[in-house]
Image (spheres, rainbow, N blue to C red):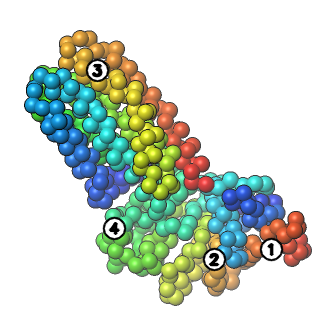
Amino acid sequence: MLLSVDNLSVSRGGISLFEGLNFTVSTGEFVLINGGNGVGKTSLLRSIAGLQPIDKGKIAINADNFIFAGDANGIKTALTVLENLRFWSAIFGGKNLHEALEKFQLRQLKNRFAGKLSAGQKRRLSLARLLLTDRPIWLLDEPTVSLDKRSMKQFSKILKNHLEAGGAAVVASHIDLGLTLSSLSINLEDYQMKNGNINASAKAFL
Amino acid sequence: MIALLQRDLILAVRAGGGFGLGMAFFLIVVILVPLGIGPDMEILSKVSVGILWVGALLACVLSLDRIFSLDYDDGTLELLLTSPIPLEAVVTVKSFSHWISTGLPLVVISPILGLLLGLQVSDLKWVFISLLLGTPALSVIGAFGAALTVGIRRGGLLLSLLVLPLYVPTLIFGANVASKGLADISNSSALLILTAVTLAAFSILPFASALVLRINLR
């Protein structure tokens, strides 16, 4: 098992977001987190990544096992595409830089400054970082924002390959990525506290 | 970590505000002061150490907020936090790259500016040595202030207010090394204390900065 979340409660700014969340992720598994705006999708991913404190419960994950991609791209606009990737490759000790360029169709753009890329191209560059490391768990927050249909399809394919190769992913997204692999879908709205009780549907699920 | 240092130095050159800004500011301060005091070389050479040290200090403060805020804004800091490199090492490397891009150029041009202020050629080495030993502390103490104010919009002024009082020991002993050296009095104790201040700052503050960054990134 790569990740287990046990009876997790998280709040933001003193307001409880969700409570009593349980799930586990093993090799090859994919968890889709959905729910409306402000329901705590980002907070959940940040909590798993250790960027945000939790209220209650337990998250078991090896800090060397995951790579996090938040809503910010983490791109330096004054560096070229290749320089950006080379930097993250050096940080994460990865090697397959050219494979990442190829798979995210960035080869033509490799010498362009990241500041001159479109929003979708920047997103692709940001996602290409995932392929620079062997870390198995991908924690992705709205990974397909600004991507066009073709890039989205390509990304789904890359994600699928990653899962088939023994990886795992926890993805917060509104969009159906078209993955048919063993996947779990969690709607965080089911775990919101309402009148002191967790929603009925979630209770049934638990 | 070398990649991080390399990247920060490239960014300091390309994105502007790194190498040039601090040095230009330093130059202007040192040129303006004689215009205010007057051309009396005797007075100037007496206050030259103070001018050079205060000038270096202010020039250093100018670019402090860039240490973390740029990485915070574009999400890089968050990603570095989840990377295999310990955050303490990230802070140390970033402080060091700030010193290379801001402190080191000031150290290098300080002898020339010392000449402008009427110092003897034989005395220039003390200005140079004191700044060389003291400016790394300015960067690492400044990084702590930058970590405290990261995420605050227009936190530059607050950062200066936080950091400048923390610069007092470095300023006192740095200026002491230079002025005693100029007066041909033994300055070895001041020299040792200045070195100790810098080493202590480098050994303690990265941990404090990393802790503060973790809290600020929540």
The residue nearer to you, when weighing B140 against A7, is B140
Which residue position holds label 2?
A173
Measure the alpha-carbon separation of dots 4 and 1. Answer: 43 Å
Q: Nearer the viewer, residue A75 or A89?
A: A75
In contact (CB < 8 Å): disc 3 and disc 4: no
- Chain designation of label 1: A
* Residue for badge 4: A80
Residue A10 vertical position relative to residue B32 in the rendered view, above or below = below
Instruction: Determine which residue is flagged by label 3.
Output: B177
* Residue A87, image x, y percentages: 40, 59
| Amino acid bearing label 4 | Thr
A40 vs A182: above or below: above
Cα distance between the residues tagged 2 and 1: 16 Å
Circle 1 crowding by C-alpha within 10 Å: few under 14, some 14–19, many from 20: many
Q: Secondary structure at mark 4?
A: loop
Q: Give the image location of residue A124, x and y in percent.
A: 46, 75
Residue at the spot of label 1: A190
**Is residue A28 visible to us here?**
no
Decide which of tag 4 and tag 2 comes sooner along the chain: 4
Kindly identify which chain the residue marked by label 4 belongs to.
A
Q: Residue at x 68, y 64 (%)?
A: A44
